[in-house]
């Protein structure tokens, strides 16, 4: 008998035979012990992305997808995880968009889902295929709000929270971590859902600026990243730029992540490409259309897609060369500044040629901005 | 998509307009991805310039402008006074700061239960795995007024959804209340054929108004369960003026991502 009492109906419905696979996500004592043993020295934590992924992302880890689908998301770091062929990762995120292609690459094996896909880009047909083929196993189903509550409970130092979400839904039957209870402070019937604090193993969070010790600053929607940074056992910060500590201390008005959480600091300009980075660059809309309209059609298509975009490049700079190089950088910066109203140029044109579905005859001629 | 200005109104444009009309000026509205975004932007550009839009990423109250490409993108937080986190933005609904929530569905049933998880009988081996909840469940659990929008067909309007992502009135009657959920539940469902509400006692879906050219029988044909027919004449849905149509086509969705139909 383990120390956890999971929602038994959900364990049964999900056909999880060995519940030990579920334990670490809510193992508070394990996470606390881990945090207590972290190196407290105010040292320079900078290293390359290759080194950070090699040292801190391990097979079987519970990993998160930061940002929001493709807004300030560590996509270039995930590509490095793929290139290093990490295995059997659990993904626990809200949204959980980017773990789909990591299943094809053999990296992601388990899902704690709250959302798959990329909004209007289309249904993630790839995930359906991998699920049917038994290449990915669902361990829990959440809503955005309740997974956010799980991360937030961890950040606030709470065993869990009572929520009014998930009640009456079928997700209760497919989430081993959630139980419906009576509100202890009410005398009338008042069902509430108990959401435990959740603790991933490793998170990679992309920010605008960090100092060499790991104090980090970003702007735009925080999604779950501040809570996740507090909860996770291992944290890699990747930053558009490394700034002096005095810069962080003198400009401490923004959202920030304290250095004590951080294990590795990676200077990674364009780390969120081909997603959007507030103030820096816009999505490559065509790239996402290519992923959904071409890549997701079949395993063969996805392999071709990964071979070209992930295995065919060694870093983000080579990736950007394929998108269109410095011209792509300039155009995508112009687009994001215009949409943020940080650009007076009335002439910025958001029209573009949509990707139609077939791999182009000469992909080097295709426009990605 | 080309020049749409000389074309007659299509059903998606009507849908966007009807949805936008649900929004009153000065309300705080929570917006899901897709058609709800069109409605929010349209309302702001026409009859409701002072609404506050809230998005699940934590983004809220952006300056007015074009359509967001994503609910986390810059158009949802441009020059916002404050940008929050996901858990906080749902907390705003729980605490009573949001008047209406707008969301889509893949399947809906006669009690307004919504499925965005999967189509099929076996959850572990579905015919189609869909997005899952996202914020859909949170909004339907917490919102004071939930407004649902989507396309109507017998495949989408089913007697019982394959998976309850977001409870509406669950099994009808007072079952929503008994489950402990907040708010009034789904109050309005809008499709390309009609506007629906729910019969107060049974909580079964009822036709509220029919779009021009749609009869009750036609509407019923496009539905996989028996619709409740209201007493008396069924009103015809108000259609957008030429001016509003121009705003949809030129300012709200100029690329026709949500409001154009191939061949129309």
Image (cartoon, rainbow, N blue to C red):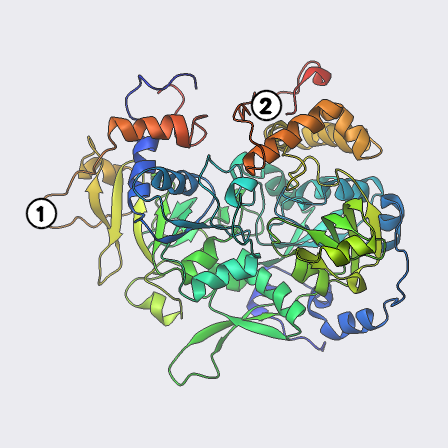
Identify residue for label 1.
B232
The chain letter under disc 1 is: B
Residue under the point 26% across and 26% down: B242
Answer above or below: position of B205 versus B21.
below
Q: CA distance from mark 1 to mark 2?
A: 50 Å
Q: Quadrant of residue A78?
A: top right
**Regarding mark 1 in the picture, which secondary structure is present there?**
loop
Q: Quadrant of the N terminus of chain A?
A: bottom right
Q: Position of residue A29 (x, y in %)?
A: 75, 75
Residue under the point 43% across and 16% down: B2
The chain letter under disc 2 is: A
Residue under the point 45% across and 36% down: B65
Identify residue for label 2.
A355
Q: Position of residue B61 (x, y in %)?
A: 47, 49
Q: Position of residue B20 (x, y in %)?
A: 32, 42
Task: Decide: few, some or many residues near mark 2? Use Cα within 10 Å; few <14, some 14-19, many ≥20.
Answer: many
| B180 or A127, nearer to the observer | B180
Q: Quadrant of the C terminus of chain A?
A: top right
Task: Decide: few, some or many residues near mark 1? Use Cα within 10 Å; few <14, some 14-19, many ≥20.
Answer: few
| B254 or A240, nearer to the observer | A240
Residue under the point 41% across and 22% down: B262
Answer above or below: position of A39 versus A126.
below
**Residue A97 visible from this viewpoint:** yes
Q: Are marks 1 and 2 on the same chain?
A: no
**Regarding mark 2 in the picture, which secondary structure is present there?**
loop
């Amino acid at each position: 008998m383990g120390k956890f009492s999971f929602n038994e109906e959900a364990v049964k419905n999900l056909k999880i035979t060995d519940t030990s696979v579920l334990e670490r996500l809510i193992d508070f004592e394990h996470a606390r012990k881990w945090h207590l043993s972290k190196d407290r020295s105010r040292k320079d934590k900078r290293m390359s992305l290759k080194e950070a992924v090699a040292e801190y992302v391990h097979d079987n880890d519970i990993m998160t997808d930061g940002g929001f689908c493709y807004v300030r998301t560590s996509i270039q770091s995930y590509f490095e995880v793929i290139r290093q062929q990490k295995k059997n990762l659990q993904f626990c995120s809200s949204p959980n968009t980017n773990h789909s292609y990591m299943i094809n690459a053999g990296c992601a094996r388990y899902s704690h889902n709250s959302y798959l896909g990329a909004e209007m880009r289309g249904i993630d047909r790839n995930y359906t295929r991998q699920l049917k083929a038994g290449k990915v196993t669902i361990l829990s189903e959440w809503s955005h709000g309740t997974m956010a509550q799980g991360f937030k409970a961890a950040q606030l130092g709470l065993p869990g929270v009572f929520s009014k979400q998930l009640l009456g839904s079928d997700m209760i039957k497919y989430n081993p971590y959630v139980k419906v209870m009576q509100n202890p402070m009410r005398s009338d019937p008042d069902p509430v859902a108990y959401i435990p604090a959740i603790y991933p193993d490793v998170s990679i969070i992309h920010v605008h600026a960090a100092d060499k010790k790991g104090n980090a600053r970003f702007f735009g929607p925080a999604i779950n990243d501040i809570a996740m940074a507090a909860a996770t056992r291992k944290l890699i910060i990747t930053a558009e730029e490394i700034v002096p500590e005095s810069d962080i201390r003198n400009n401490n008005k923004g959202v920030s992540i304290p250095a004590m959480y951080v294990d590795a600091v990676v200077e990674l300009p364009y780390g969120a490409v081909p997603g959007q980075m507030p103030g820096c660059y816009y999505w490559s809309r065509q790239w996402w259309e290519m992923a959904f309209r071409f890549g997701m059609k079949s395993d063969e298509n996805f392999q071709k897609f990964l071979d070209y975009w992930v295995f065919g490049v060694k870093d983000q700079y080579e990736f950007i060369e394929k998108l269109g190089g410095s011209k792509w950088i300039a155009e995508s910066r112009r687009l994001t500044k215009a949409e943020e109203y940080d650009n007076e140029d009335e002439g910025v044109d958001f029209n573009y040629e949509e990707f139609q579905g077939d791999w182009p005859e000469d992909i080097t001629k295709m426009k990605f901005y | 998509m080309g020049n749409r200005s000389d074309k007659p109104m299509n059903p998606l444009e009507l849908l966007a307009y009807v949805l936008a009309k649900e929004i009153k000026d000065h309300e705080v509205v929570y917006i899901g991805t897709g058609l709800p975004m069109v409605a929010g932007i349209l309302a702001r550009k026409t009859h409701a310039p002072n609404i506050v839009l809230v998005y699940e990423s934590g983004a809220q109250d952006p300056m007015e402008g074009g359509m967001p490409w994503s609910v986390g993108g810059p158009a949802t937080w441009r020059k916002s006074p404050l940008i929050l986190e996901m858990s906080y933005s749902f907390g705003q609904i729980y605490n009573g700061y949001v008047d209406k929530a707008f969301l889509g569905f893949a399947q809906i049933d006669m009690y307004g239960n919504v499925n965005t998880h999967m189509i099929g009988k076996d959850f572990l081996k579905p015919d189609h795995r869909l997005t899952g909840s996202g914020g859909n469940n949170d909004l339907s659990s917490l919102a004071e007024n939930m407004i649902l929008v989507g396309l109507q067909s017998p495949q989408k309007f089913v007697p019982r959804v394959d998976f309850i992502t977001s409870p509406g009135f669950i099994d009808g009657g007072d079952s929503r209340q008994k489950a402990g959920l907040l708010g009034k539940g789904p109050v309005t469902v809008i499709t390309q054929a009609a506007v629906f509400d729910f019969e107060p006692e049974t909580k079964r879906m009822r036709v509220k108004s029919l779009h021009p050219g749609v009869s009750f029988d036609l509407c019923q044909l496009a539905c996989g369960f028996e619709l409740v027919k209201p007493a008396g004449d069924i009103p015809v849905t108000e259609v957008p003026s030429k001016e509003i149509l121009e705003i949809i086509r030129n300012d709200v969705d100029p690329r026709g991502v949500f409001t154009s139909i191939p061949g129309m």
